[in-house]
Image: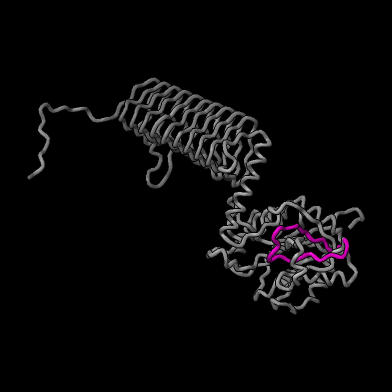
Amino acid sequence: MSLNAPIPVDVVVMAAGKGTRMKSRLPKVLQRLAGVPLVQHVLNTAARLNARSAVVITGHGAEQVEPLLLAPGQALAVQCVRQEPQLGTGHAVQQAVPALADDGVVVILSGDVPLTQPDTLQALIAQCGGQQLALLTIDLADPTGYGRIVRQGEQVQAIVEHKDASPAQRQIQEVYSGIMAVPAKQLKVWLSRIDNQNAQGEYYLTDVVKLAVADGVPVVAHKISDALQVAGINSPVQLAELERAHQLRQAHHLMEQGVRLKDPARFDLRGQLDGAQDVEIDVNCIFEGRVSLGEGVKIGANCVIANCTIAAGAVVHPFTHIDGEKLGVSVGEGALIGPFARLRPGAQLGAEVHIGNFVEVKNATMAQGAKANHLAYLGDATVGERVNYGAGSITANYDGANKHRTVIESDVHIGSNCVLVAPVTIGAGGTVGGGSTITKSTEPGALSVARGKQVSIANWARPQKKK
């Protein structure tokens, strides 16, 4: 390593706890905040630190936790070690020691503290500098239950756990967040020397502080004021409170970029939302996955929108559901969608397309100016410019074994209550009469009608109910 090379960072995530107060069969670190498991938030932050690796300590529910952590797609190398039995935080980190190289800085995080910011951790790592033990601390009005920071002048002398603290020490408001940065080589030495002589009979990670002091290693504290960054989750109530606080923070960030939210308290982002200027979002909307909204887009109330791109000037009316999943959805400039519309994966809508109430579009392209305004289904279809697709009409795309495609060329008019049985092509400029079932392709400009002849019987007597 050159003299100017950055010190490698390895992250240890403690995720072995049972989480009894969550009252859930799902392990605590898999509970979701903004649609993402708590422990995944922590790993995402570690990745943004450009960490060399992450070691996750599992225990309770490991058979559920580990498959998520080891699944393809993680942004950094993850290794799992198990803590069995669970004898305290120091004992937990001892399990990670064999997986840690000696040449780095170890950042210790908690799998149930999801919102610590990368810049905060970078500052903590900088204070460590590969030479000092750096602790992330915060002042709390009510520090009950937290380890207190005991100082002599500016230097930290110890962390005293709440149950072991004296009455005077319990008055201290500066507390340890559970997050530290420490040189790996020294951490290993200190972990080998901790004991369980305390009120809990556990091996405390916090005892490394007094061991560092005894060895003459400086212990420094990086104090922050943002409690959200160190807030842990222990109950459904705390999870809900942190969810709302996090969502409000995301809402404010978007508004600072020029997005207009009718009510920031009634907004949920469970992924990534990019909004251009003059975007307007009404109340009770949920955004998931990756969503991009062009300039001047208007989103009505009570919409659920995921994995899509909506171009400038488009309007999405209330109660619309859009989810592109892996294929994505795109909505063109000036398009009108909804209310009560559903766009499914592969829906690609051109400029000024109209999709009205109770219309579903799946794996279909609609060219500029095409309209399906009422009660219709377009699946596996290619729709040309200026097509008018009637109420109650469907593309019958599935034969019970395979999907087939319907092609509707430009300027076609499809009447109401029609069934287009794929594979079939409706020629440009053609018309399909209402109530028709079309099983054969049609010529351009043709009128196609396929329905039973109307029969009227005069003076017909309706059957009477028997007495």
**Residue 151 falls in which quadrant of the image?**
bottom right
> Is 284 placed left or right of 259 in the picture?
left
Question: Which residue is at the front of the view, 350 or 397?
Answer: 350
**Height in image: 323 above or below 447?**
below
Magenta-span inclusion, residue 148: yes
Q: Is residue 443 above or below residue 252?
A: above
In this view, the residue in front, 396 or 169, is 169
* Image location (x, y in percent) of residue 364: 48, 35
Query: Residue at the spot x=57%, y=39% of the render?
Result: 263
Residue range in magenta is 132-153
Residue 250 is one of the magenta-drawn residues: no
Identify whether 403 is placed above or below 60.
above
- For residue 79, side relative to residue 180 (left or right): left
Across and down, in percent, residue 411 comes to 44, 22
Residue at screen point 84% across, 63% down: 133
Residue under the point 40% across and 39% down: 397
Quadrant of the image containing the N terminus: bottom right
Q: How many marks?
A: 0
- Taking depth in this image into account, of 373 and 109 the one nearest to the observer is 109
Q: Is residue 73 left or right of residue 221?
A: left
